[in-house]
Image (cartoon, helix red, strand yellow):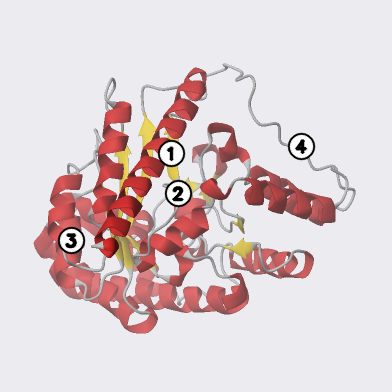
Amino acid sequence: MDSLKDVISYVQQQLAEHPERDREKAREAALTGKKREFPVIYISHLGDPTDTFIPQGELEIPKAEISNPRENALAAEMLGKLEPLKMLNPVSLDFELGQGPGTLVACFGIPLDPETMYTPAYNKTIEEVLSQPLPDPKTSGLMPEMLKKISIIKELTPDIFKIARPDTQGPFNIAHSLVGEEALIEACLDPDRFHQLMAKITDFWIQTVMVLNEAIGKERETVWDRVMRIRECSVNLVSPEMYKEFILPYDLKIAEVFGAPGIHTCSGPHVFYATLENIPGMVYTEAGYIACAAAGHTKVDDAMAALRGKPIMLNIGQELPEGKELETILTDLGRYAETKRLLFSYVGMHWRKKDRPLIRDMHRTADEFWRERNRQTTFIHHKELEQ
């Protein structure tokens, strides 16, 4: 495709032709507790660099061939957003910023290594971090590059294309990435210095998100970014007591500024309960089977029981047990009868590219299961009205 206008039209048309794959509408319904027409499930196989199988018969997505480099880059990213449709997975029309979990760490002067998926190249000491001035939220690390991209997107594309905030992690995740193992033991060795570290990181976190929010603007904000997301992966490596005393105060500070957050628990049970019990008004949390999680996983049954009667969305994310893949998915879809605040995503760790036809068949079965459940619910509702 040789013009940005044509790419914009094509991508919008593809989403219009696949309303059952609209991730933003599903997220909005789940966050607000409203009934939705489609399940909008994400089902994937493991990414394996040695997997050279070439799938056949999938949706063909055109390539961008625009002479203007800025427009071509945006067009390629837009077309890339349609890739999930090859496996009948949901799509979101948003642009991404940053370089994953390391994005804000780079602002503290640590380069990201492209050969290790842009993880921080090394750690600093706590003393080094505390002795240096707070990074500038507009000019440090990747911030100039991201702010420039936001400006270009807003200049060249219509408001229907949203701009997702980059992965800002959470204060303790950043602390762990910044100073490594010191983040896990400093609270015991020198509590005051640990609090200084967390306070400094949190202040920068808040300032940076404010800068990003202002640059993106409400008209370009994604549904998901209406809620502040705090990632708590590294909390799985410390005790609930340490979380409550040394990390929770900074999560609550973020909540004071931006409103009640959603929590990425990295599936850890003690993180699930510690955040649920201590963060007022939490908007969403997570659960699901993960075979090799650092601190175990939160069972969906347990999460459903803990959230019963609470207006909190549950993002179910599970590794699918071999031989029980479809059973697991349909069991989760059945939970929708209890609460509308559910989202669903799955990965088959034993699957590879050759299994994509199987994944598409599972989508079709799940969609039909959902339609039949909706028909039954509507029929029962009409009968009750007649009586």
Please rate how many residues cluster around mark 1, counting C-alpha atoms within 10 Å: few if below 14, some from 14 to 19, many from 20. many
Residue that mark 3 sits on: 307
The C terminus appears in which quarter of the rendering? bottom left
Residue that mark 2 sits on: 38
- Of tags 2 and 4, which is closer to the observer? 2
> Residue 311's quadrant in the figure?
bottom left
Mark 4: amino acid? Pro
In what element is the residue under mark 1?
Answer: helix
Mark 1: amino acid? Asp
Q: Distance between the residues labelled 1 and 3?
A: 26 Å
What residue is shown at x 32% (from left), y 78% (from top)?
255
Mark 2: amino acid? Phe
Mark 3: amino acid? Leu
What residue is shown at x 47% (from left), y 67% (from top)?
225
Task: Indicate the position of residue 315 as horizontal and vertical percent values.
Answer: 32, 53
Q: How far apart are marks 2 and 1 (CA)?
A: 7 Å
Q: How far apart are marks 4 and 3 (CA)?
A: 44 Å
In what element is the residue under mark 4?
Answer: loop
Q: Distance between the residues labelled 2 and 3?
A: 23 Å
Query: Quick one: label 4 or label 1, which is nearer the N terminus?
Result: 4
In what element is the residue under mark 3?
Answer: helix
- Mark number displayed over residue 68: none
- Of tags 1 and 3, which is closer to the observer? 1
Residue that mark 1 sits on: 367
Task: Indicate the position of residue 59 as horizontal and vertical percent values.
Answer: 66, 31
Foreground pick, 201 / 272 = 272
Residue that mark 4 sits on: 62
